[in-house]
Image: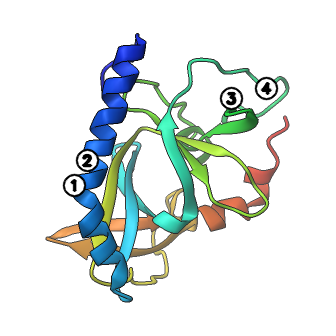
Amino acid sequence: MTRLNTTQDVIQLLKEIERRNQQGGTRLSQQSARQDGWTAIDFKLAKLNYLIPLTDTREIFPVPQQLTKVPKSKTWVYGIANLRGELLPILDLKCFLLGQPSKINNRSRIIVINHPDIYSGLLVDEVFGLKHFQSQPKQTMQQSDSAIAAYLNGNIAQKDVNWDVFSFQKLASDQRFLNAAK
């Protein structure tokens, strides 16, 4: 993604998003009409791709340039941003799960969790967009002992590619995640 330095850059980006939205709108509405179909967002974290159900997210946006650090917070608390007049806590998901702070670049994104009690954004390495599937993911018991395994909610395959499904609901119920103070 290019830098948005001028008003014209922002306008061009919005026009491109609108064009892509109009092209894909028919396909998305047809896909949504199928009751057994499933739509998710494909994102990267620490060189691995995961899916999150579309219903688990409110929105996705680039990392804001204006950010306020939170004193006396854990290292994975990235900061607080003003998102359309609301203060949004931003948490570094890679740092929380793996202890490795994210390296911010033009592909880094914030995914806002769709949770009734927690309003926060998660910093991820990259978001690739929507993925549409013909069926729901398989609910599996996690055999892995990785730090991420406790937050996975199944897996799904398409065209010889397998994805693990990340659960923001499991993350939001973790007491370690809920306690961001040092």
Query: Which residue type carries mark 1?
Result: Gln
Nearest to viewer (mark 4 / mark 1): 1
Mark 2 vs mark 1, CA separation in Å: 5 Å
Compare marks 4 and 1 and give the one earlier in the sequence: 1
Q: Quick check: 61 above or below 159? A: above
Mark 3 vs mark 1, CA separation in Å: 32 Å
Kindly identify which residue carries mark 2. 20
Question: With 85 as the anchor, is 103 left or right in this view?
Answer: left
Compare marks 4 and 2 and give the one earlier in the sequence: 2
Tell which of 90 and 132 is nearer to you: 132
Compare marks 3 and 4 and give the one earlier in the sequence: 4
Disc 4 crowd rating (10 Å Cα; few below 14, some 14-19, many 20+) is: some
Instruction: Look at the numbered disc 4 and give the secondary structure of its residue.
Output: loop
Query: Which residue type carries mark 3?
Result: Ala
- Residue 29 coordinates in the image, percent (x, y): 33, 72
- Residue 71 coordinates in the image, percent (x, y): 83, 23
Question: What residue is shown at x 38% (from left), y 70% (from top)?
Answer: 39
Q: Quick check: 15 above or below 71? A: below
Disc 3 crowd rating (10 Å Cα; few below 14, some 14-19, many 20+) is: many
- Residue furthest left as drawn: 159
Instruction: Look at the numbered disc 1 and give the secondary structure of its residue.
Output: helix
Tell which of 10 and 133 is nearer to you: 10
Kindly identify which residue carries mark 3. 81
CB under 8 Å between callouts 2 and 1? yes
Question: With 67 as the anchor, is 37 left or right in this view?
Answer: left
Nearest to viewer (mark 4 / mark 2): 2
On residue 23, which mark appears? Answer: 1
Quadrant housing residue 130: bottom left
Kindly identify which residue carries mark 4. 70
Query: Which residue type carries mark 2?
Result: Arg
